[in-house]
Image (cartoon, rainbow, N blue to C red):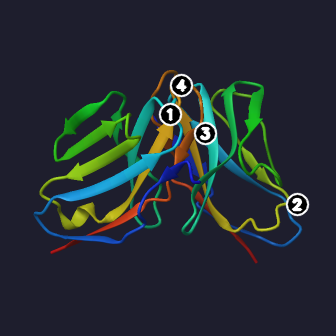
Amino acid sequence: DGGITQSPKYLFRKEGQNVTLSCEQNLNHDAMYWYRQDPGQGLRLIYYSQIVNDFQKGDIAEGYSVSREKKESFPLTVTSAQKNPTAFYLCASRRQGSYGYTFGSGTRLTVV
Amino acid sequence: QKEVEQNSGPLSVPEGAIASLNCTYSDRVSQSFFWYRQYSGKSPELIMSIYSNGDKEDGRFTAQLNKASQYVSLLIRDSQPSDSATYLCAVSSGGYQKVTFGTGTKLQVIP
């Protein structure tokens, strides 16, 4: 079955560390997205990519980085420059046209 | 002004009743409208898409769109306790343009 796989499900990071969240899809979708969800604030767009080797900043890109070397993969790195990284991170993909997102199951990141 | 607005709730309805969830948006060029259901601790799941004015029905769910009033709604008939979740309204101007989400309305269906 096609879908989006995010790993790990839970991640703990020490202050000052970079961590990378994995996102893989086998839906053959061109576009992929990273959102962050905090309580009471809805989903906020971090980065998105419409094609391989190209990506754009979203509304809250500071302290994050991404790569899109393969169509199936869109990893997100949370750097030490992100001051408040504790959140629920959601990866999504979308097929060409005006269709809704398919979401992965999310990664819950906690700074300890 | 928020781009997509929803009442955060909670909206409480008795089992078997109709739940009515509302959403307004600010961008007049928006073309695609979505409703997602999100259970606590889980990721959002797409339940309805609507692109033209009027009603779209899918089982117990009906999405309603009024572009002139910039208003989208979701009706859930014969509400069940399993419908208890947060419902996110989302709007896009089309193509690969980003989808903007509201903060969601929490629905509680009381047995």
Q: Quadrant of residue B18?
A: bottom left
Residue bearing mark 2: A81
Q: Are marks 2 and 4 in contact (CB under 8 Å)?
A: no
Quadrant placement of the C terminus of chain A: bottom right
* For residue A48, above or below residue A34: above
The residue marked by circle 4 belongs to what chain?
A: A
Residue bearing mark 3: A24
The residue marked by circle 2 belongs to what chain?
A: A
* For residue A1, above or below residue A38: above
SS under mark 2:
loop
Q: Please state which of residues A59 and A90 is positioned toward the viewer in this rendering.
A: A59
1 or 4: mark nearer the eye: 1
At a point 33% along the width and 27% down the height, the residue shown is B52
Residue bearing mark 4: A28
Measure how far apart labels 2 and 3 are at the Cα level.
25 Å
Of callouts 2 and 4, the N-terminal one: 4
Report the amino acid beneath label 1: Arg
Judged left or right of residue A16, residue A93 is left
Q: Please state which of residues B77 and B67 is positioned toward the viewer in this rendering.
A: B67
Residue bearing mark 1: B28
Residue B11 in the image: x percent, y percent? 30, 69
Which residue in the rendered view is the most extreme toward the bottom?
Answer: A112
2 or 3: mark nearer the eye: 2
